Amino acid sequence: MDYILKVEAKGDNFKCYIDGKLEMEVSDKSYTAGAIGVGTFNADGRFDDVKVNGPGIAPDAVSANGKLATTWASLKR
């Protein structure tokens, strides 16, 4: 089964959508900077067409360039 997931982070406000429906909204001041990651809990998941947008983030910040071919192929599978 495929889902379209979207997460918006503006300041300390986070909104999570699944297939366009708002599923969760939370305010959390503990994360002022850091990396972005995606994952699953007790499930097998694959992620495709990951996009990251925002001030100071270069267009197409997520790419296969420099990744091992086998890792990228697994991600694209």
Image (cartoon, grey):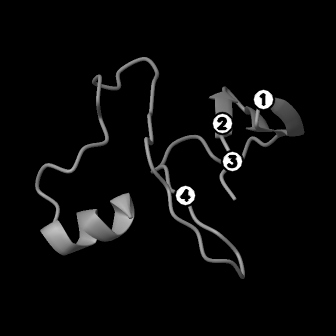
Residue behind mark 4: 38
Q: Nearer the viewer, mark 4 or mark 3?
A: 3
Residue behind mark 1: 20
How far apart in space, not on screen, are marks 4 and 3 (Cα)?
A: 14 Å
Q: Residues within 10 Å of mark 4 (few under 14, many from 20)?
A: few
Q: Does residue 34 appear left or right of residue 3 in this picture?
A: left
Q: Residue at x 44, y 33 (%)?
A: 52
How far apart in space, not on screen, are marks 2 and 3 (Cα)?
A: 10 Å
Q: Earlier in the sequence, mark 4 or mark 1?
A: 1
Q: Residue furthest toward the front?
A: 1
Kind of residue at badge 2: Lys
Q: Earlier in the sequence, mark 2 or mark 4?
A: 2
How far apart in space, not on screen, are marks 2 and 4 (Cα)?
A: 11 Å
Q: Nearer the viewer, mark 1 or mark 2?
A: 1
Q: Residue at x 58, y 68 (%)?
A: 45
Task: Tell me, yes or no, whether the two marked residues, 1 and 2, touch with CB atoms within 8 Å.
Answer: yes
Task: Tell me, yes or no, whether the two marked residues, 2 and 3, touch with CB atoms within 8 Å.
Answer: no
Q: Residue furthest toward the top?
A: 55
How far apart in space, not on screen, are marks 1 and 3 (Cα)?
A: 10 Å
Q: Residues within 10 Å of mark 3 (few under 14, many from 20)?
A: few
36 lies above or below 39: above
Q: Residue at x 58, y 65 (%)?
A: 39
Quadrant of the image occupied by residue 75 = bottom left
74 lies above or below 47: below
Badge 4 marks a residue whose secondary structure is loop
Residue behind mark 3: 3
Residue behind mark 2: 6
Query: Which is more toward the observer, 2 or 32?
Result: 2
